[in-house]
Image: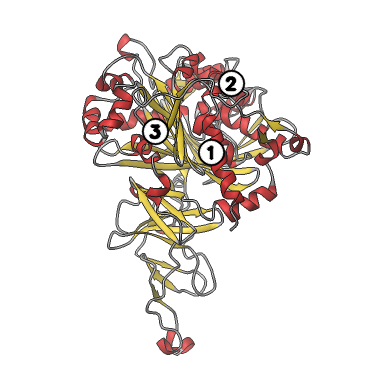
Amino acid sequence: MIPAHIYNDDELFAREKERLFSRAWMFVGHESEIPQDGDYVVRRVLDDSFIITRDSESTVRALFNMCLHRGMQVCRAEMGNASNFRCPYHGWSYRNDGRLTGLPFHREAYGGDDGFPKDGQTLLPAPNFASYNGLLFINMDPNAEPLEDFLGDFKFYLDFYTKQSAHGVELRGPQRWRIKANWKIGAENFAGDMYHTPHTHASIVDIGLFREPKAQKRKDGATYWAHRGGGTTYKLPPGSFDERMRYVGYPDEMIARIKDVWTPRQQRMVGDDGFMISAATCFPNLSFVHNWPRVRERVHDRDNEVLPFISIRLWQPISANETEVCSWFAVDSAAPAQYKKDSYKAYLMCFGSTGMFEQDDVENWVSLTTTAGGSMARRLLLNSRMGLLSDDRPVIEALPPDSFHGPGRAQVGYNEHNQRELLKLWADQLELPA
Amino acid sequence: MSAPSMRKPLPSLPFHDIRHLQAHQFLVDEAYLLDAQQYELWLDTLTDDIRYVMPVRVTTARGAGFDTSPGMAHFDEDKYSLSQRVARFATEHAWAEDPPSRLRHFITNVRTFATDDDAHLEVESAELLFRSRGDVNESTLVSCGRQDVLRRSGGSWKLAHRKIIADESVLRMQNLAVFL
C-alpha cells in the first residue's frame, strides 16, 4: 500500500534531492544532439546546469555551467556551436573542453601566473558522466556504480528503443513543458500501467487511430521488470520475426538492419514469444514509448497502414508538485527519409505537448498531485496490490523463460508489479543515509 | 539584427483596405470558434491542403541564426491529423477537455500583406490564449505570434498555412489540447 501523500510532499522532495537524485544516473541527452565538433546543449540535473559539449577533438563532455571566478553561467543559450564560452560578467573564457584560456588583465589583476596559474583550471566536470547507446547520463556521486552495472539487464530492453542499426538512433527536440504533477507519476505510468490504457485512452481507439479495434487487447501483453527498469509489451498476431516487425510498420530494409544488431535472444522475444515493446521506465525518471498508429486517412485498403514511432522522455523534477516534461522524438539514423517523416508525424499525434495520449494522461496526473497535497491524503493508503492475491501469490504466474526470452521477471495480464518495483528502488534510496 | 523567427517588416496594407478588413474579420471570427470550441466549424475554415505548424522555440545566442529546435515542433499538422484531434474531442472519453477549459483567444497586432497573386494574403497577428480549468489550479497563458496565409475561396477566405511562433521555450500549459 502506498501513502497517498508521497505524490505531493515537500519534505519527501527534499529527501529525494538529498538521497536519490544525488546518486542515481540522470539522463541529460543523446550524442546525436551534438553531432559536430563544438556543438553543445545545456541540460540540468535538478538545480545544476551542465554544458554538454562535443569539444574540438570530438570528445563529449559535461561541464558545470558556472564561472570559476564569480559563479555566473558561462553559457546562457540552450543549444548552439561554440569554440569558446565567455563569461558575460568579467570576461573569463573557456575552451569548449572546459579549459580556462582567457582572463582579462591577468598580469595587472593577478600578477600573471604567479598569482593565479591558468594552466589546469577548467570548468568543473560532472562528478560522473557516461553513455550507453549514445544516451548520456550524469551521476552526482563520483563513487557511483558504473552506468552499465546500474542499468544491468534493462540494457536488453533499452536496445529495442535505441539500437535499431549499427548507425544508432537520432533524437530531435525535446519539446519542453511544465505540468503541475509529481515526477513519480509519469515514471510509474510508463513503467507498467497497462491498466489505464483501455479507459484513459478510450478516445484514441474511438477515432480509429490504431488498427486494433479494442484497447482491451492490452491485457494480452506482458509486463517485465529487469534490474533498474521495466516496461509493457503488446502481444502480436502469429508470425515470424520479419512478419511481426512488418505488422507494426517497419520497412524491410530497417528489419534487415535491426537483425544485424539485435541479439538472437532479443529477436526471439518478438519472433518466438510475440511480444513487442511499448512503454518503459528506467529508474528513476527516464521513460520510453514505442507504438504504431495510422498516420494518414484510410481511403484504400493499402492505407490500412500503421507506422512505429519512438519517444524518449525525462520527468525533470521541479518541486514536489511540478515537473518539466522533456520529450524527444527518436528514430534510427539510417531509416529512409519518408519513414522518418511519417514516424515523426506518428509521434506528434500520440505523444509530446500536443499528443493525444499525453493530453489525457497529464489531466489525470495533475488532478492526482493536487489531491495528494491535502491532509486527508496523509490518512489514505492507495491500493497498489494489483496482480497479487491476499497471501501475496501472483494472480497470474510469471512467464517461463521459453515463453518470454527477455531477462528479468515477466507476466501477462493487468498488474502493478512494475510500479511496486520502481517504488521499492525509490524507497531503498530514501532510506539510505546520504 | 532581428530574431530569426520574426518576419521582415514589409509595408503592410492600409488598415482601410478591404483585404485587410476581411483578413482581420477572418481572425476575429476564427477566435470566436476556438473560444467556443466549435471545432467542426473551425475545420471548415481550413483549406484541404492546410499546413499548421508550431515550432519548438529555443534560447540561442543572437548570432546563432536560428531560434527554433531543428526538426521538432509542437504542432506539425495536415487536415487528417487536425481532423483526428477534433474527432477525439467529440468522443465521450477526451478527459483533457472534459470538463472543458474556459478559453479566450485574444488576437491583436493584425497586419495584412498582399502577395504576388490575388488569391492569397499573408496575415500576421499576435495571440494571447487564456485557459482556466477547474477551481484549484491557476489559469495559464500562451503568448505567440502567428504567420498565416489565407486563400480566396468563393466569396470568403480560408486558412491555407499557419505558423505559430511560441514566445516560450518551455510551455507553462499542461498540454496543448487547444488550437492557437
Are labels 3 and 2 on one chain? no
Q: Provide the residue designation for mark 2.
A: B94
Q: Are marks 3 and 2 in contact (CB under 8 Å)?
A: no
Q: Nearer the viewer, mark 1 or mark 3?
A: 1
Amino acid found under the numbered disc labelled 3: Ile
Q: Nearer the viewer, residue A341 or A378?
A: A378
Q: Nearer the viewer, mark 2 or mark 1?
A: 1
- The answer to whether residue A175 is visible is yes
Residue at screen point 46% across, 88% down: A115
Numbered badge on residue A422: 1
Q: Quadrant of residue A425?
A: top right
Residue at screen point 59% across, 22% down: A389
Residue at screen point 65% across, 45% down: A320
Numbered badge on residue A310: 3
Amino acid found under the numbered disc labelled 1: Leu
Q: Reading the chain from its start, which is encountered first: label 1 or label 3? A: 3
Q: Is residue A193 above or below residue B140?
A: above
Q: Secondary structure at mark 3?
A: strand
Q: Secondary structure at mark 1?
A: helix
Are labels 1 and 3 on one chain? yes
How far apart marks 1 and 3 lie (CA) works out to 22 Å
Tell me where residue B144 appears, x and y as whole percent.
55, 40
- The answer to whether residue B143 is visible is no
Disc 2: host chain: B
Tell me where residue B161 appears, x and y as whole percent.
44, 30
Q: Which residue extends farthest front?
A: A391
Within 10 Å of the Cα at label 3, are there few (<14), some (14-19), or many (20+) other Cα atoms?
many
- Check the picture and name the quadrant holding the N terminus of chain A: top right
- Check the picture and name the quadrant holding the C terminus of chain A: bottom right
Tell me where residue A213 appears, x and y as whole percent.
45, 11
Disc 3: host chain: A
Residue at screen point 36% across, 61% down: A82
